[in-house]
Amino acid sequence: MTTRVRTMLVAATAVALSAALAGPAAAQGGGGGHSATRAAMKAAVEDGVPGVTAGARTDGRTWAATAGVGNLRTGKARSVDDRYRVGSITKTFVATVLLQLEAEGRLSLDDKVDTWLPGVVEGNGHDGREISLRRLLNHTSGIYNYTDDKTFVETYFLKDGFLRHRYDTKAPEDLVAIAMTHEPDFAPGTDWYYSNTNYVLAGMVIEKATGRPYGEEIRDRILAPLDLRATTVPGTRVTVPRPSSRAYSKLAESTTGPTYDVTRLNPSLAHAAGEMISDSRDLNRFYTALLKGRLLPPEQLKEMKTTVKADDIPNAGYGLGLIERELTCGVTVWGHGGGIHGSTSEAVTTADGRHALSFNFNGDWSGDTDAVLEAEYCGK
């Protein structure tokens, strides 16, 4: 996974499971290819990830496989049909809706945040009158990342706090207010830093511009037209729809200790920065449709693909909710990563939409997602 979200989650929930948990890989479709991807998935399990589910689409042909387990108690394998929390992959959906609204003339990405959310971004040097919507989407706003807040981490990511507060409901205004108790990271437009607060605000702007919850706009504008039946915006629902596996975390800042089942939680703590649920098939369909221009007019897709340097992501640029990455073999992929308690995901496709890959680890403390990406696009 990419971005500071996973960096924080890994630091806050780390260890290794026994390699004995690694089960044989299972596969469907696609013939005998993807051997390097299978090997990378197996390696992730050997590294401590409980289980992996993955799906690819190449020139209309589909392939799917699993490795490891979806339930540590029963030993049940993961399924290629598993639904899982996709974390920050949510950001691409949110950015797509905002760009659709721009194409319809209902807002401009050059609008200031304060135009839509007066008085919400202010305090300790923050000023919504100086920050455009575009700077929210490409993380050049300088707005403090609320998930970096020490008390928030202790309350929602470490064991004692999480076990007491996993079902709390957080309003988006509450999340932004946490960020406003800190100084900005930099003046707007002068640097890049990944901030989940940016996308909480983006979701709030969608709601202000349309008069409807941002999740309803995603459902009507993206999920229904693309028939993404496994994809949901759960709001405060604490469960993951079936079929699904359990999600596991260490809920600690060390790489040793017990493993906790964190499947059930109230995802309002992530809101528009990372609350969505999907599966590999739907994610491949979404990113393929997006890069092929089925969701945005050419002008808005060009805006989305206009990147700034993202120092925290190797060989990558960050667009508007979309990451461009050049792999070691020279292949460029577009997509996003996502992390939330017990769930680490990646979803990417080539610029022409002809080769897409999505996968999920049901643990958040180990495993190399980059190795799976490299294996799929660069492996033999």
Image (tube, helix red, strand yellow):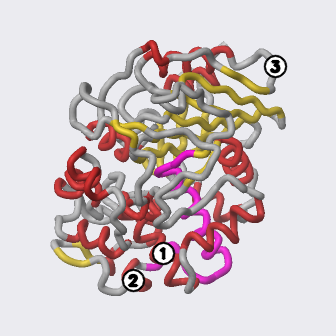
Q: Position of residue 286 (x, y in %)?
A: 69, 51
Q: Nearest the camera: 13 or 139? A: 13
Q: Which residues are magenta?
A: 84-111
Q: Quadrant of residue 60?
A: top right
Answer left or right for 59 relative to 82. right
Name the residue carrying label 3.
Answer: 31
**Three-letter amino acid code at disc 2?**
Leu
Residue ID at (44%, 51%)? 264
Q: Position of residue 360 (x, y in %)?
A: 54, 36
**Three-letter amino acid code at disc 3?**
Gly
Q: Secondary structure at mark 2?
A: loop
Residue ID at (54%, 52%)? 240
**Magenta stretch: includes residue 88:** yes
Mark 1 vs mark 3, CA separation in Å:
48 Å
Q: Is residue 374 above or below residue 243?
A: above
* Res. 273 in view: yes
Q: Main secondary structure of the magenta part?
A: helix
**Magenta stretch: includes residue 293:** no
Q: Earlier in the sequence, mark 3 or mark 2?
A: 3
Name the residue carrying label 2.
Answer: 117
